[in-house]
Amino acid sequence: MKRRRQGSEDQFDFRFRREDGADFWAIVSAKPLFGPHGEHRGSLVAITDITARRQVEEDLRRARDELEARVAERTEQLTLEVQERRRAETLALEASRTKSIFLANMSHELRTPLNAIIGYTELLGEERDGEDELQRDLGRIHGAATHLLELINNILDLSKIEAAKMEIVRERCVIGPLLDDLQSTVLPAAVKNGNHIQILCSEPQRTIVIDRTKVKQILLNLLGNAVKFTRRGWIELRVGFEREDDVDFMVAVVSDTGPGIPAHKIGSLFSAFQQADGSIARKFGGTGLGLAICRELCHLLGGDIQVKSEAGEGTTFTVRLPLLPM
C-alpha cells in the first residue's frame, strides 16, 4: 500500500482460496488512484485467473524433470555399456595378441622338425635311382611336408604381423636379379600347368632401397597364386617406377588369364582365411592367408595393393611401394 501511495504499480502472482476451499492462481495488478488535488484515494486492482497457465507450467516443469532424469539414467547406462564394450575389446585384443605372440615364438619349434623331414626325404631320394615305389613314397612325403611348412609359414607370418614382431630390414638391391630369382622359382610350376610366364621391368639395372625379402615374398605369393589357378594361360609381372610428391615408388603389376574373381568376392579377398570360392581349398589347397599377408606386408612397407578382376576374365594385382632415397 505504501508503494502505491508513492505512485508505484504492482503486479504479482498470488494464490487465492475460494469459499469452497479450492485454491486458484491469479495475476494481481494494482495501480494507485489519486484525487484532483493529488491525494491518494485508493488502488485499482485487477485479478486474472491463471490457474490453467500455472498448471501447464507445472506439467512442463514436471515433464522436463522427468526427461532430465531419464536422460541421466540412459547416459549412465550408455557409459556402462561403452566401458563394458571397451573392456571386452581390450580382453579380445589381449587374447589375440597373446595368441599371436605364442605362434610367433613357436616359429622355430614348428619349422625345425618339418625342415628335418624335408631334408631327410631329399637325401634319401638322392641316394635312390629310378622310379620305384619307395621313391614315389618319398616324393609324397616331401610334397606333404613342404606344403605343411608353407601353411605354417603363412600362419606364423600373419601372427608376427599381428603381434607387431615383423621387422623391416631395408637394404640396397638391384631389381633385375630379384626378378630373375622370382622367375626361376615359379617357372617349374608354370610349365607344369601349361602356362607361359613373362617378367618385364622398365629399369632392370636400377638399385633400390627396400626390404628385399618382403618384396620377394609379396610378388612370389601373387605369382604363385596366378600360376596355381591358371591353366594353359598367360601370367605376366610388369615392374616400373613412378615419382609422386618427391617420393619414388615401385609399381608391380601381376596379371593372369585365369578364372577371375566374382565381383561379390573382391571385398573379402584380402581377409584372413578367405578364398574366392569354397571349392578352392578342396581343389588347390591353401588357407586363404596369402593375400592377407601380402596386404599386411604392403602396409608394413608403407604401400598398398589393389585388385581388378572379373569372373572368366583373369585377375590383375597392383602393388605400389615407396622407395627410400639412396
Image (cartoon, rainbow, N blue to C red):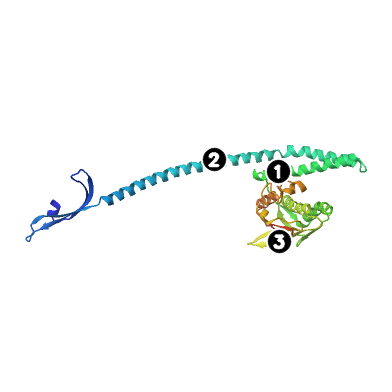
Residue farthest along the front direction in this orientation:
20
Instruction: Look at label 1 and name its amino acid.
Output: Ile
Between disc 2 and disc 3, the foreground one is 2
Residue at mark 3 to residue at mark 1: CA–CA distance:
31 Å
Looking at the rendered structure, the secondary structure element under dot 2 is helix
Please say if the residues under marks 2 and 3 sit with CB atoms less than 8 Å apart.
Answer: no
Instruction: State the residue lying farthest toward the right.
Output: 130
214 vs 87, nearest the viewer = 87
Among the two numbered marks 3 and 1 on one chain, the one whose residue lies closer to the N terminus = 1
Q: Viewer-nearest of labels 3 and 1?
A: 1
Q: Is residue 281 visible?
A: yes
What residue is disc 1 on?
A: 155
The foreground one among 72 and 52 is 52
Mark 3: secondary structure: strand
Number of residues whose C-alpha sits closer than 10 Å to that of mark 3, classed few (under 14), some (14–19) or many (20 or more): some
Q: Amino acid at mark 2?
A: Arg
Residue hosting label 2: 87
Who comes first in sequence, dot 2 or dot 1?
2
The answer for how far apart the CA atoms under marks 2 and 1 are is 27 Å
**Residue wearing tag 3:** 241
Residue contact between numbered discs 2 and 1, judged by CB atoms under 8 Å: no
For marks 2 and 3 on the same chain, the one whose residue lies earlier in the sequence: 2
Q: Residue at x 69, y 38 (%)?
A: 105
In this rendering, would 94 be left or right of 168? left
| Residue 90, x across and y down, in percent | 57, 41
Percent coordinates x, y for residue 305 in the rendering: 68, 55
Q: Amino acid at mark 3?
A: Phe
- Image quarter hosting the C terminus: bottom right
Residue 120, position in %: x, y? 84, 38
Q: Nearer the viewer, residue 250 or 196?
A: 196
Secondary-structure class at tag 1: helix
Asked whether the beta carbons under mark 3 and mark 1 sit within 8 Å of each other, the answer is: no
